[in-house]
Image (cartoon, rainbow, N blue to C red):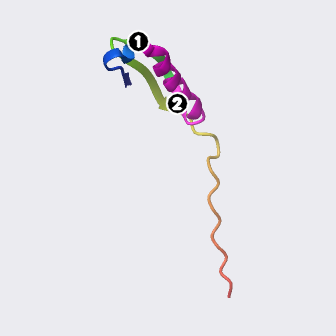
Amino acid sequence: TLRFRGREITHQEIGLALLNRMRDDLADLIVVEQFPKLEGRQMIMMIAPGKKKPGGAAKPAAPEVAA
């Protein structure tokens, strides 16, 4: 949620660009459930955690101990 205060509401395109940049930066981690929309003085975008990739991250190998 992005809340516009005072005269900020006249620059809605800046708020939309901010939410879109956040969506693009987190694209591999999230799923957008609702794209940005304006409700009064708030711009709302609903996101959820993304689906995990099959296999997941490889577990780190145990460090070798030199004897």
Q: In this view, does 52 lie to the left or right of 41?
A: right
Tag shown at residue 10: 1
Q: In which quarter of the image is the C terminus?
A: bottom right
User: Residue 38 appears at what percent x and percent y?
Assistant: 40, 12
User: Where is 43 relative to 67, above or below?
Assistant: above
Identified at 46% across, 21% down, the residue is 15
Q: Which of 10 and 62 is in front in this view?
A: 10
Q: Is residue 27 left or right of residue 18?
A: right
Q: Report how far apart the C-alphas of labels 2 and 1 lie in the structure.
A: 21 Å
Q: In this view, does 63 lie to the left or right of 35?
A: right
Which badge, 2 or 1, is on the more N-terminal residue? 1
Q: Categorize mark 2 by other alpha carbons within 10 Å: few (<14), some (14-19), many (20+).
A: few
Bounds of the magenta segment: 10-32
User: Where is 61 relative to 50, above or below?
Assistant: below
Q: Nearer the viewer, residue 30 or 45?
A: 45
Residue 34 visible somewhere in the drawing: no
User: Residue 57 appears at what percent x and percent y?
Assistant: 62, 50
Give the residue type at disc 1.
Answer: Thr
Q: Nearer the viewer, residue 41 or 29?
A: 41
Tags 2 and 1 touching, CB below 8 Å: no
Give the residue type at disc 2.
Answer: Met
Examine the residues drawn in magenta and state their main secondary structure.
Answer: helix
Q: In which quarter of the image is the N terminus?
A: top left
User: Residue 24 appears at what percent x and percent y?
Assistant: 59, 29
Identified at 65% across, 80% down, the residue is 65
The mark lying in front, picked from 2 and 1, is 1
Q: Categorize mark 1 by other alpha carbons within 10 Å: few (<14), some (14-19), many (20+).
A: few
**Which residue is labeled 2 in the image?**
22
Q: Quadrant of residue 10?
A: top left
Q: Quadrant of residue 39?
A: top left
Identified at 68% across, 84% down, the residue is 66
